[in-house]
Amino acid sequence: MWKTEEGSTGRLIQLCIGYFVFYVITGISVKYFLGSSEQGFPGMNDLEYLVYSTIGGNVFALSVVLILKWYKIQSNNYVKIFGINLPSELIYIIPSGICTAVVIPTTTLMYSLPISVMVAMVMMRGSIIIISRLIDAIQIKQGILKKHVYREENIAVAFALTAVAINLFWNKNGGFDFIYNSAAVIILSCYITAYFIRIYIMNYYKNTRGKNIKQDNKGFFALEQISATLTMLAAGIIIYYSTEIFGSHYKQVAVFRDTFDNPGAMWGWAVIAGTAFGIVAFFSVFIFMFKGRTATFAGLVNRLTSLIAGTAATLIFYFFFGGKFPATEDWISLIFILIAVAYISRAEKKRTAELIALKEI
């Protein structure tokens, strides 16, 4: 039942189920730990939870790739540096890991800004859908991607963007007010730029495998994770010891250091909760890099799954923790999301038939 072939629809469904389940857990965890202490929740601030959950997620993911030795990637070719044979792919996987180190904190920082959380979600999810379609267009023109984007995929993009835009225009506070917040613009720009580079690299790797060279997604993830962890560790150390210079000017820097010097009572549980985010990273990357699919398709599957999981997390939190019930616009968005899923399903059937004919799966 659970045994599926690489690149098959069954394997894709399994990844989506895993992504959905742990994304829901991650969503509930964020709501729980950031909930008001007056209502019986830990009442952590955004940065505090970001630090602890990021540590938990990264330690878990890094432990898995090191213990299982996924870093031994199957390479197109090797280059000798200081007498050591290294995979040539490191030249772009390391930058991808650095971009990942930018994406992780900016994702949470977007939610901590004085703008609507819903608007932040819409901007981030919508940008990934657009980026994925743009990358396909670029790589087709470059001759890197030999496949074409199906009409059904383009229609799904339109419905998915409509779904995320509904919340943007429904927002009573003005969906585009964030452009007047310089911090929001800078953070969102960093998020979009880093994700664009990262998704481009993922698809470059996927679309440039040599003949009889396996698409080693586990190896890619492992090397990217190691690079991301080292980048965040270096950045964390620099920020921690910069308080003597910036502490009196930037409150967030002082708060960052305080999360280590004076951890709250629930810090350990926040770290454990962060492991769900670490697990999500596995499924997310494997969906983005799914064999034989376009960036448009993979980006849609990834974002649509997260959108549905976000609604599910809100519902579960409402029933079990007394949170807010999903708003009207959330349900309307869900209708458009399901329509997009229907078109994606049709595209998947066509793509599977194509790949079987080409003997790629």
Image: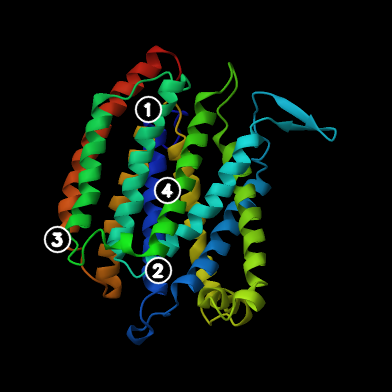
Q: Where is mark 1, residue-wise?
A: 137
Residue 9, compared with residue 32, is above or below; it is above
Residue 48, compared with residue 123, is above or below; it is below
Q: Where is mark 2, residue-wise?
A: 112
Task: Point out the tag, 1 or 2, that comes first from the N-terminus.
Answer: 2
The three-letter amino acid code for the residue at tag 1 is Ala
Instruction: Tell me the quarter of the picture where residue 13 sits.
Output: top left
Task: Point out the tag, 3 or 2, that comes first from the N-terminus.
Answer: 2
CA distance for labels 2 and 4: 17 Å
Q: Nearer the viewer, mark 3 or mark 4?
A: 4
Q: Where is mark 4, residue-wise?
A: 192
The three-letter amino acid code for the residue at tag 4 is Ile
CA distance for labels 3 and 2: 24 Å
Q: Nearer the viewer, mark 2 or mark 4?
A: 4
Q: Tell me if 81 is positioned left or right of 185 in this view.
A: right
- Element on which disc 2 rests: helix
- Element on which disc 4 rests: helix
Contact? badges 1 and 3 (CB < 8 Å): no
Residue 36 placement (x, y as % from top left): 36, 81
Contact? badges 3 and 2 (CB < 8 Å): no
Residue 334 placement (x, y as % from top left): 20, 50
CA distance for labels 1 and 3: 35 Å
Dot 3: few (<14), some (14–19), or many (≥20) neighbours within 10 Å? Answer: few
CA distance for labels 1 and 2: 34 Å
Task: Count numbered badges in the picture.
Answer: 4
Dot 4: few (<14), some (14–19), or many (≥20) neighbours within 10 Å? Answer: some
The label on residue 328 is 3
Res. 234 visible in picture = yes
Q: Nearer the viewer, mark 1 or mark 3?
A: 1
The three-letter amino acid code for the residue at tag 2 is Ser
- Element on which disc 3 rests: helix
- Element on which disc 1 rests: helix
